[in-house]
Amino acid sequence: MRILVIEDEPQAAGYLVRGLRESGHIVDAAGDGVHGLDLALENLYDALVLDRRLPGLDGLELVRRLRAAGSDTPVLMLSALASTHHRVEGLQAGCDDYLAKPYAFVEVHARLAALLRRPGRQLLGARLQVGDLLLDCEGRVAQRQGRSMVLQQREFLILEKLMRHAGQVVTRGMLLESAWDYDFDPRDNVIDKHIHRLRQKVDQGFEHPLIHTVPGAGYMLSETPPE
């Protein structure tokens, strides 16, 4: 899933973001309601997890504005305000679920999964295709010309990033941020090693490679080599 976490308390935000990423999800984060609403309206997410009390724009108003803009993205609200009255307020504002603090991450994850299982709800971009390469984002299985390949967690995250930006240069920093939550280049060549393993699965044995190196820039997934 692609998830947006909106939480102003750094420790709580880090706990959620780390847990969701370790569970294999792609996660963005915002520390206030204004930035969170901007991200929610500008990007496509499978679900939002947000605190009720946020600086700039509180969680209830954020959800109201999100719904007024026509978004039906599932929203899980987290709050220390746990009375029946407060839960009803959250649901009436447009939240799909409401979880009282303190909470266990396993319950947050289970509730998100339940939201996505509701009838008519599908994961964002559950199947991606570039040329003859298909990626099942739910099963984390890629297939090319009938040949299936099972991907490890970081291989999947790297390939998904490349496929969502097909035909565009994806820098090593972008790949690190997606798969490791790093925004800097490490001293070792961890990205190059994973790209090498991906090429063995995606390109080896096929006439035309799809994963290309762009010298001095990064990588590109394309049916034709970059100029």
Image (spheres, grey):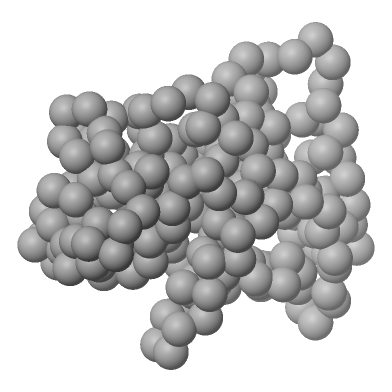
Task: Name the quadrant of the N terminus.
Answer: bottom right
Residue 35 placement, left or right of 144: left
What residue is shown at x 60% (from left), y 59% (from top)? 107
What residue is shown at x 19% (from left), y 50% (from top)? 60
Give whichever of 65, 98 is nearer the camera. 98
Give how far across and how far down residue 32 sits, in percent: 28, 30
What residue is shown at x 32% (from left), y 47% (from top)? 81
Residue 111 placement, left or right of 181: left
Give how far across and how far down residue 47 sits, in percent: 42, 60
Give how far across and how far down residue 55 sits, in percent: 22, 27
Quadrant in the picture for residue 182: top right
Give whichever of 15, 2 is nearer the camera. 15
Tell which residue pokes out farthest to the front in this image: 83
Q: How many marks?
A: 0
Please say whether residue 53 is visible from this viewpoint: yes
Residue 190 placement, left or right of 17: right
Quadrant in the picture for residue 68: bottom left
Tell which residue pokes out farthest to the top in this image: 187
Give whichever of 138, 85 is nearer the camera. 85
Task: Name the quadrant of the C terminus.
Answer: top right
**Relative vertical location of residue 134 with respect to residue 24 in this rendering, above or below:** below
**Relative vertical location of residue 12 with respect to residue 132 in this rendering, above or below:** above
Give how far across and how far down residue 208 sits, in percent: 75, 59
Please say whether residue 218 is visible from this viewpoint: no
Tell which residue pokes out farthest to the bottom in this image: 119
Residue 201 placement, left or right of 140: right
What residue is shown at x 55% (from left), y 49% (from top)? 103
